[in-house]
Amino acid sequence: MAIRDEFPRLAAAEFDEVVTHSHVRDVQLASGRTLALITLDNGRDHTRPSTLGPATLFELGDTLEAQRARGAAGEVDAIAVTGKPYFLAAGADLSNVGSLPDRETAAELPRLGHRVLGLLHEAPVPTFVFINGLALGGGLEIGLNADYRTISSAAPAVALPETFLGLVPGWGGATILPNLIGIERALKVIIENPLKQRVLKPADALELGIADAMFGPASFLESSLRWADGVLGGAKVDRPHVPGTLERTVKWPIALKIARETLEKRIGKVALAPYRALDVIELARKNDRAAGFAAEDAALADLIPGDQFVASIYAFDLVQKRAKRPAGAPDAALAKPVTKVGIIGAGLMASQFALLFLRRLQVPVVITDLDQGRVDAAVARIRGEIDALAGKGRITTDEQQRLSALISGTVDKADFAGCDWVIEAVFEELGVKQQVFAEVEPHLSETAVIATNTSSLSVEQIGARLAHPERLVGFHFFNPVAVMPLIEVVRTPATDDATLATAMRVAKDLKKNAVITRDTPGFVVNRVLAKLLGEAMHAVEQGSSFEDVVEAQRAFGFPMDPFVLLDLVGLKVGAHVLDTHHGAFPDRFFESQALHELAEQGILLEKDGKGEVKGIDKRARRIVAKHRPAGAVALSADELRVRIEDGLADEIKRMLDDHVVEAAEDIDLCMILGAGWPFQMGGITPYLDRVGASGRVFGGTFHQPPIAGPKA
């Protein structure tokens, strides 16, 4: 019986699937043994990763069954799986999962994955997976189900990102991985990394024990085949992290307890998937694959039809599709070449810019400031970061030397003459930014683009003194620059298409996602955050407890509460952002004298010796109470939540009416990429629709029909 006959509902369902085919060829190894090599290839170019939909799995299953039969007959000595250039597989094909017709059909998908990938385990001959490129989710689980794994040192990412998407690793990952690399390492890969949007590099996978050997890309397949031949000949494969009895009985329960407590502290209890993953990992302690796989099946059967996964798919589509085709972007052919970058300022932010431009663009970067000492210190700091990257093995010695040679510093603005792209990283004061641009512009060619990293000031006003304001664009990074994936590209009424196209090209070359916004206070992310933070400070000044304010915003699922966020961005920066928005929209945004005093004193959170937050500092509570007006009325957590939701719905509707961005999807994308709005919440505008805020405020919804997802 063919495998598809075991899964009639999936076989009958209609999918718009790009099928990844399983191509087989026999390879004669140096020893004379024969290895059946299966190559996964979706027939598309190298920009379209292979994915694993039902048709792909049916074909792979039939192929594996055929090779197992050959192994049992003595025709082949081993079975191996690899991928087309640059990709093993990017996991399950999620494009149709949200449209599965019913729960019963959805329940067949995890069982199909287990059935097919499980054919690599306990086969009549040894099985190998050669991870030649990207391996995410189900792609990595192909390898975990095999006996042995090699990895290319050029593979861009290895990860099990499912919990970030509202699922659990459901094709063996949550069961096999803890028994391969130990509980603490597995928790990092399955829980911590996805929630922090981190992936493993090949060297990490090797060190953890996910991969047994690593080889360079030029001869990866040949080296993997030679290594496999050695294993078939009896070479020992050392796996030092496989858990023993002591770890299973003592460390395993403790690690899971700590993981649960950490999750509750950091993300609350809104997200379901991480906790379901912990349940499966806890069961994996018995190393019973059948029981573990059944638990994975049950978890996915609950999660796939659930609201959080539907919401996650909406967010996933925004990041995978809309982010790659930015709304309102001009013709990319208009972009000007960037062969040299100038950075005005020599502080920490400027140093982050310089390192990013050096690594991504590989062009000369010159940095300037008023004082030669500051310039020299910045250049030394940047070169120190380059040396640190080399020390960690993240760049080669040759690249280290080349990047170090590309950075230079100066106090003479004339040295910016050859720059095609100039960006400032100076104080967030209008006059300062106007002055530095007025000083540098006379030295630039007429085609050079000038960019400002302002977070809330008017880009048009910053360029008011420029001779050529049409070449000015806002280019707002988020901190930390190297990590945060969003850039808000701000177009003024004067910005021409060539400048905007160049900004979009630079953002892409920096491997960032860009969203085009109008020149308006706070653009998108800071305007929404100013609403959240302003409401938080106003509430405590009116007498609500800090704890109630935190509880009121917990339903949004943010990775940190508003006061931790204020501490992170800096109290002075937060006060400036609130002042800017109050000045622009005094009827809707609060100013906070208490926050100014907290910023002057440098007081808000109480922390322990390790920097962990213990609560609100008692002195901060006294300062806030001092600013409480007569007749102030404290609101409960529920009252505050509704007030904040309605305020957000009102503000976002105004932003859309004013064409700050083209659509609600762009606001959702900005909040996901720039503020950490959780995937499982599905974007801020669908959330406001679901909780009724849109209806209460303007009698409609942002989306038609409303997008399903969790309300709290």
Image (spheres, rainbow, N blue to C red):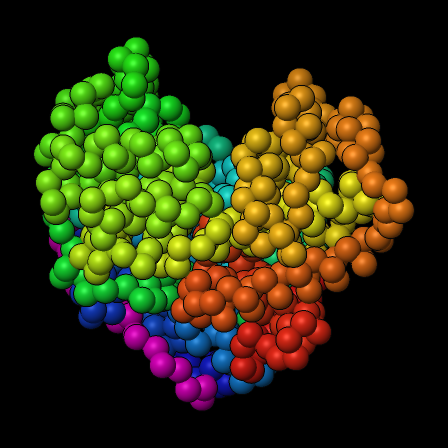
Q: Quadrant of the C terminus?
A: bottom right
**What stretch of residues is rendered in magenta?**
12-30
Task: Give the residue at x 35% y 43%.
Answer: 462
Q: Position of residue 461 (x, y in %)?
A: 37, 46
Can you say whether 459 is above or below 653 in the image?
A: above
Q: Where is residue 284 in the image (x, y as percent from the top left)?
A: 61, 49
Residue 248 visible? The answer is no
Q: 673 or 353, which lies in front?
A: 353
Task: Give the residue at x 70% y 57%.
Answer: 644
Q: Position of residue 403 (x, y in %)?
A: 19, 27
Q: Where is residue 236 in the image (x, y as percent from the top left)?
A: 34, 34
Residue most toward the top? 373
Residue most toward the right? 631
Q: Quadrant of the N terminus?
A: bottom left
Q: Quadrant of residue 340?
A: top left
Task: Give the residue at x 33% y 36%.
Answer: 434
Q: 15 or 540, which lies in front?
A: 540
Residue 650 visible? The answer is yes
Task: Give the residue at x 39% y 25%.
Answer: 348
Q: Is-magenta flag for residue 20?
A: yes
Q: Is residue 275 left or right of residue 676?
A: right
Q: Is-magenta flag for residue 161?
A: no
